[in-house]
Image (cartoon, grey):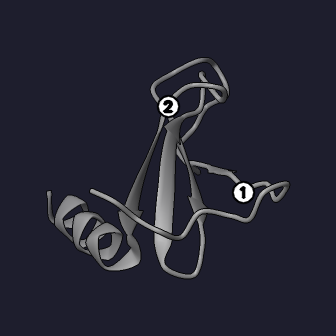
Amino acid sequence: MSVDDFPAAGTELAWHKSSYSSGEGGQCIEVARTPRSVHVRDSKRADGPTLAVTSTRWAAFVAFAAQN
């Protein structure tokens, strides 16, 4: 999936860790929002790969996850 909504050069994303994170090295994610996309990464690997999806797709994922 291609999302053309990355921050401008020199601009950092504002990452937010899951409220379920215990701080003990568990399985946590961090997300960063832009106007049209949501970026997701492993909180233990801040320099690792990220996944970017549209805000619409992210909302559908969160709604699905909330049902299960």
The front one of 21 and 60 is 60
**Image coordinates for residue 50, horizontal then vertical, percent:** 49, 40
**Around disc 1, counting alpha carbons within 10 Å, would you say few (fewer than 14), some (14 to 19), or many (20 or more)?**
some
Quadrant assignment, res 64: bottom left
Q: In this view, does 16 lie above or below 55?
A: above
**Image coordinates for residue 3, horizontal then vertical, percent:** 40, 65
Q: Quadrant of the C terminus?
A: bottom left
| Label located before the other in sequence (2 or 1) | 1
Indicate which disc residue 13 carries: 1
Left/right placement of residue 15 relative to residue 27 reads: right
Q: Is residue 67 above or below residue 59?
A: above
Left/right placement of residue 40 relative to residue 54 reads: right
> Residue at image x 58%, y 37%?
21
Q: Name the residue under label 2.
A: 49
Q: What element carries label 2?
A: loop
Q: Are marks 2 and 1 in contact (CB under 8 Å)?
A: no
Q: What residue type is labelled 1?
A: Leu
The front one of 24 and 49 is 49
> Residue at image x 57%, y 81%?
35
How much space separates mark 2 and mark 1, taking CA atoms? 14 Å
**Image coordinates for residue 43, horizontal then vertical, percent:** 59, 32
> Residue at image x 85%, y 54%?
10
